[in-house]
Amino acid sequence: MAFSRGAWPAITAILLARGLFAAFPAASVDMGDMLMMDRFRQWQATHNRSYLSAEERLRRFQVYSDNVEYIDATNRRGDLTYELGENEFADLTQEEFLARYASSYDGTGDDAGIRLPVGGGDAEPWSSGGDDGSSLEAPPPSWDWRSKGAVTPVKTQGSGCASCWAFVTVATIETLNWIRTGKLVALSEQQLVDCDQYDGGCNKGSFHRAYNWIVENGGITTAAEYPYKAVRGACSKSVRNVVKILGGGVIPPRNEAEMQVAVAGQPIGVAIEVGGGMQFYRSGVYSGPCGTALAHAVTVVGYGVDAATGVKYWLVKNSWGQTWGESGYIRMRRDIGGPGLCGIALDVVYPKMAK
């Protein structure tokens, strides 16, 4: 077994993993490694993490050590608008993390079912006046649907279910339903995972196709009636659908200005590439690095300007739990042009509901 850290003998590493410091001469144990192991033990206790064997614990310690060194080095740079930090993903390699949490979105074949119209004009726009749109204005400089009480708490898709697409579909409909009715109702991702035949359940999917399925199904039920299990099961036909949509719309790609208008009227669903370091994002405005290989779906629930740096951002709700990022959210740099940061402006949708 080869290890990435070569400053100390392999036998020392094994003893560290098993906690057998007393059985090995203290002079042979690197103090930095001992401190890192103590840090690892504290991380295990914080996140209630255990391993089946000493060998697996040693392997995870190696990964954790490398990740902590990366986090610390990134934060020391001093030229970034965001900060990284240890979280529950600190014992996963980047490849493992991407496979488990950031490869859930499949935007191919989005013409299945009902065609969604292109054009943000159908989205619920920002308006200071009535429903006739006669008093349309430029959207406000900042917006946060959470401050209205219109966003459900951040949820967790889990490591074994590639279902981010279902969480975005549900999140956008939840807030639009609040806009229409004044009632915030948590809706069921599991119903989509189990029943949406256009998508793969825990094996990737698309918010385009999920909107289509909800229209054809006559609506979607509540999370209380059909709770999330993070595994695809048999579709329950006995549930009561409580929220209906007319369909969805697509905002043209590469148009962050139109995205801003739309978000001021209702949250929107987007697809992104999960960029370097995003696994450990803690706070601030994320600015990359990342490309445009769209593989993860998230919900934009607001936007603003960071007071400390003056950097414009999108306020993004994720599905990795409330201990990741800023209580489950990430602020991503806005108005950079072209495809947007991490491709955020390339695949943008919103649900439509009768007024």
Image: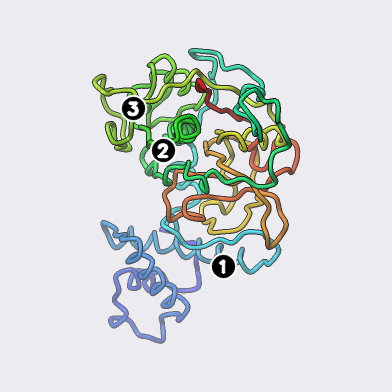
Between label 2 and label 1, give the one nearer the viewer.
2
Q: Which numbered disc covers residue 47?
A: none
Alpha-carbon distance for marks 2 and 1? 40 Å
Judge from the rendering whether residue 192 lies leftward or rightward of residue 261; answer left or right: left
Q: Helix, strand, or loop for circle 2? A: loop
Judge from the rendering whether residue 47 lies leftward or rightward of residue 96; answer left or right: left
Give the x, y percent position of residue 9.
43, 73
First of labels 3, 1 by sequence position: 1
Q: How many tags in the picture? A: 3
Instruction: Kindly identify the residue that appears in the image at 61 percent across and 58 percent down.
Output: 284
What is the quadrant of residue 348 in the picture?
top right
Alpha-carbon distance for marks 2 and 3? 13 Å
Between label 2 and label 3, give the one nearer the viewer.
2
First of labels 2, 1 by sequence position: 1
Q: Helix, strand, or loop for circle 1? A: helix
Between label 3 and label 1, give the one nearer the viewer.
3
Q: Which residue is mark 3?
A: 221
| For residue 211, above or below residue 346 | above
How packed is label 1: few (under 14 Cα within 10 Å), some, or many (20 or more)?
A: some
Quadrant (top left/top right/bottom left/bottom right) for the N terminus: bottom left
Give the x, y percent position of residue 145.
54, 43
Give the x, y percent position of residue 274.
56, 44
Q: Which residue is mark 1?
A: 72
Instruction: Kindly identify the residue that appears in the image at 67 percent across and 66 percent down.
Output: 77
Instruction: Kindly identify the residue that appears in the image at 66 percent across and 35 percent down.
Output: 128
Alpha-carbon distance for marks 3 and 1? 44 Å
Q: Which residue is mark 2?
A: 184
| For residue 257, above or below residue 107 | below
Q: Helix, strand, or loop for circle 3? A: loop
